Amino acid sequence: MKFLSQKLLPSSSEFSQKKKFLIVIVLFFYHNVAAVKLPNNEKIPAVIVFGDSVVDSGNNNNISTVVKCNFPPYGRDFVGQRPTGRFSNGRVPSDLIAESVGVKKILPAYLDPNLKIHDLLTGVAFASGGSGYDPLTPKIVSVLSLSDQIDMFKTYINKITASVGKESAAIIVSKSIYIVCTGSNDIANTYFSTPLRRPRYDISAYTDLMVESASSFFQELYGLGARRIGVVSLPPIGCLPSQRTLRGGRDRGCSETVNQAASLFNSKLLSEIDAFNTRLTEARLVYLDVYNTLLSLIRNPAQYGFEVMDQGCCGTGNIEVSILCTRYSPGTCNDASNYIFWDSYHPSEKGYEVITPMVFDSQVHKFF
């Protein structure tokens, strides 16, 4: 029996090779949904996402916060018509980008208790709804800060290293595409809706604080091995349905004050990205302009197949978001695809399906 066991059981090195072969097979089958042509037919091993509710795919389900959406009608147009913790009626940009580059159709949340190793190898979202660049912003609503998300990313690297080895893990980290999407909560909530920052900062100084925090985050991410980093601009925050209601007057117009703050931050962010790329020649930070893209949809909704641009589908569409948007909300629309926005703060799945290719796909070549 001893002779048979020595001949039939693989050695530790053979087992390791077979394990890695199986992982390669898994990755191969994940790479079958590409929608954009990548330079030199390159394969992206994973998509890894940081940020706030726009790209949170369910992390807030597993932390103690009121900023949740793991209940109907959220997710009513998702696979299986189930709420997943995504702040929309269906998929969100983290999912759509992962599909666009041929990784997978659904990008899971890192804190999903059902994650398997192959989920990690092809990417996850660390994003947390309610977060921001300003370290104070996530504290207000008890969600994951960018610092928390970086700490989870470090643990993620350790996990994939234990699975595929240091060399393969380093390739995954360096060749993956990273998306950073946050900052709206800083402007809309921390600055304009609370008295916590305005006594000490005018909007110019506050956007400086945001950019300094963003730059530190990019630097830390780069130091951990990330190279291809897509940075999403702030949207025209003043045109979100909630901001129209709170700051748009009787006619619920766009708040120009809030939009100007977002534009100011975006201009500083773009300058910081250019400086970062100049300073670090291996860096491929790409500015992803959602501001002008979303503004185009809002100004010309019919051109993009929408009927409603100033209200969300959920409830009255004027103020409901998160715990205010429930299955019992009055008047929730029948067809969210007619609406740019799902709730008063977040686009609908159809909105994201129009916006994401316009913002991301046209910039893919800049990552290489």
Image (cartoon, rainbow, N blue to C red):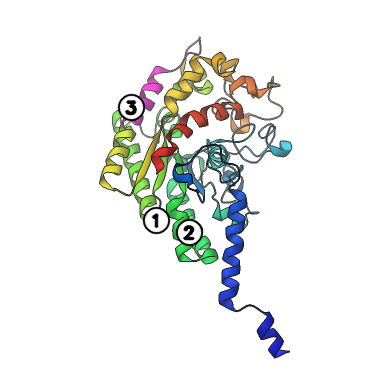
Whole-percent x, y for residue 166 in the image: 46, 65
Could you classify mark 2 by the number of other residues whose Cα lies within 10 Å: few (under 14), some (14-19), or many (20 or more)?
Answer: many
Q: Name the secondary structure under disc 1.
A: loop
Residue, x 50% and y 18% (percent of image)?
A: 298
Marks 3,1: beta carbons within 8 A: no
* Residue 227 lies within the magenta run: no
Residue, x 41% and y 27% (percent of image)?
A: 192
Q: Name the secondary structure under disc 2.
A: helix
Marks 1,2: beta carbons within 8 A: yes
Q: Main secondary structure of the magenta part?
A: helix
Counting residues from the N terminus, which is met first, the one under dot 3 or under dot 2? 2
Whole-percent x, y for residue 59 in the image: 57, 46
Residue, x 29% and y 29% (percent of image)?
A: 204
Real-space Cα distance between discs 3 and 2?
A: 35 Å
Real-space Cα distance between discs 3 and 1?
A: 29 Å
Instruction: Identify the residue position indicated by label 1 in the image.
Output: 224
Q: Nearer the viewer, mark 3 or mark 1?
A: 1
Residue, x 56% and y 30% (percent of image)?
A: 352
Instruction: Identify the residue position indicated by label 3 in the image.
Output: 264
Hey, what amino acid is under mark 3?
Leu
Instruction: Identify the residue position indicated by label 2 in the image.
Output: 157
Hey, what amino acid is under mark 1?
Leu
